[in-house]
Image (cartoon, rainbow, N blue to C red):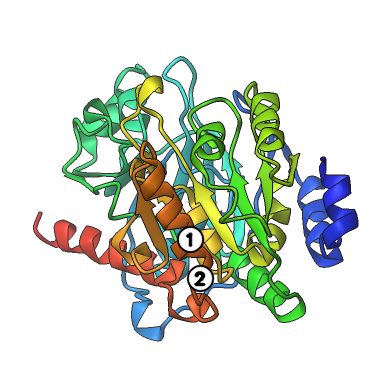
Amino acid sequence: MNLEDFYSDYGNVPQFLKDQAQDLLKGQEFNTPKGIQRYAHMNIPFEIKKEWVDESLKLNILMAHFKPWKNEMDSLDYPMFLKTIWPNSTVHISYDKSSSYYPRVFDIKSKQVQEIEKLLPHYDVMITRSAALLNMQNRASTKDIISKTPLKFQMRSMGYDHYKHGHDFVFKDSEVGPPPSPVYRSNAKRILKEREKEKIILFVGSFAGWKNQGAFVDFVDPDLCKDYTFLFLGKGIKQQETAEKCKNKKIKYYMGCIDHALMPYFTSIASLNVNNTDSRAWGQPYDPNPRTLGESTVSNTHSICSRLTLHSKELSDYVTSYDHECKKSLNAALEEGLKRDTSNYNSTFISLEEKCFSVTKIILGKMNKV
């Protein structure tokens, strides 16, 4: 069944989330290799401690491949956080997807993002994601910036060794598991005050194969979840195949796609979140800290995940790992997850602000040694 059927059975997305999504659609459009994008929420409701703020720092910082159209730690939120605690520093972000074209560059102001024409000739520190440093090295117009920038940090190597080369410090993918944006956190808390949990088991991600939803259905014991509904949010070539597997096991299910701005509704009313990822066939050793783990946690929802779904130590109390190639292990995790008391998750889980500051302290420590 589709999402219209789901809304009929469980109620529609709250209007305030729909309004937020509509506001974002009114923003400036950017044509990117990933399609049309728009700026994310800029007025992020950060909870900042006074001792974090340092007006004396006047650094030039480049955060390479931090996209301004997502409210996530490794997109817009961390750059905005740095500008908030270091107001007299210059914080630039770039969208650097390929070495074949000059990156889009943005300047972070106080609660504003403005696109600018080009990068500075050099920076005091560079914080990168993915292949951004490689792209800059392989582009004639940007390679000199690297040699003139004394410190380079890799935030998200995705498990690839060649993404680590050229950096002075590489964060482990397990270290920088991102708590969700304060925007998401605020929305989830509001919904939790207005709605009770439903007997819904949530699966978020495309049906392209590596999210492995069908394999979960193959192994699951339907008696353990006979009173529950499976909700799949995503699309892809494996969608119909997964639907048939649910029908064969007499598992009630819904499938559909939503704008990410609406996601807090689904993580908040769900009883359990599942990430059954196996990305090895696609050349990636693991799925590093999928955002739904943190988003579910601030929504008072436990997650169970495959052994190849990497998560940070801060998530250890909110996530149960299992061997996704073993029926017994998978079903034990499912049974245990459905019994969890999750009512205080969002008050005990580390905030994005706390995580950003802990990463920043490491960067500052390395800078002071230069």
Q: Which mark is residue 335?
A: 1
**Is residue 192 shown above or below 66?**
below
In this image, 319 relative to 341: left or right?
left
Q: Position of residue 129 (x, y in %)?
A: 37, 39
Compared with 49, 60 (above or below) is: above
Q: Residue at x 55, y 55 (%)?
A: 273
Q: Secondary structure at mark 2?
A: loop
Q: Which mark is residue 339?
A: 2
Q: Are marks 1 and 2 in contact (CB under 8 Å)?
A: yes
Residue 44 or residue 149, whichever sits in front: 44
Q: Quarter-wise, where is residue 235 in the image?
A: top right
Residue type at the position of mark 1: Glu
Residue found at x 36% / y 53% = 321
62 sits left or right of 69 in the view: left
Image position, residue 130 (x, y; %): 37, 34
Q: Is residue 170 left or right of residue 57?
A: left
Front residue of 79/312: it is 312
What quarter of the picture does the C terminus occupy? bottom left
Q: Residue at x 50, y 33 (%)?
A: 215
Q: Residue at x 48, y 23 (%)?
A: 102
Q: In the image shown, does 71 or 301 lie closer to the viewer?
A: 301
Q: Quadrant of the N terminus?
A: top right
Badge 2, how many Cα within 10 Å: few under 14, some, many 20+? few
Q: Is residue 41 visible?
A: no
3D distance between C-alphas at marks 1 and 2: 7 Å
Q: Mark 2 belongs to which amino acid?
A: Lys
Residue 308 at what x, y percent from top left?
34, 40
Q: Quick check: 242 above or below 192? A: above
Q: Report x, y in % for residue 290.
A: 46, 47
Q: How many marks?
A: 2
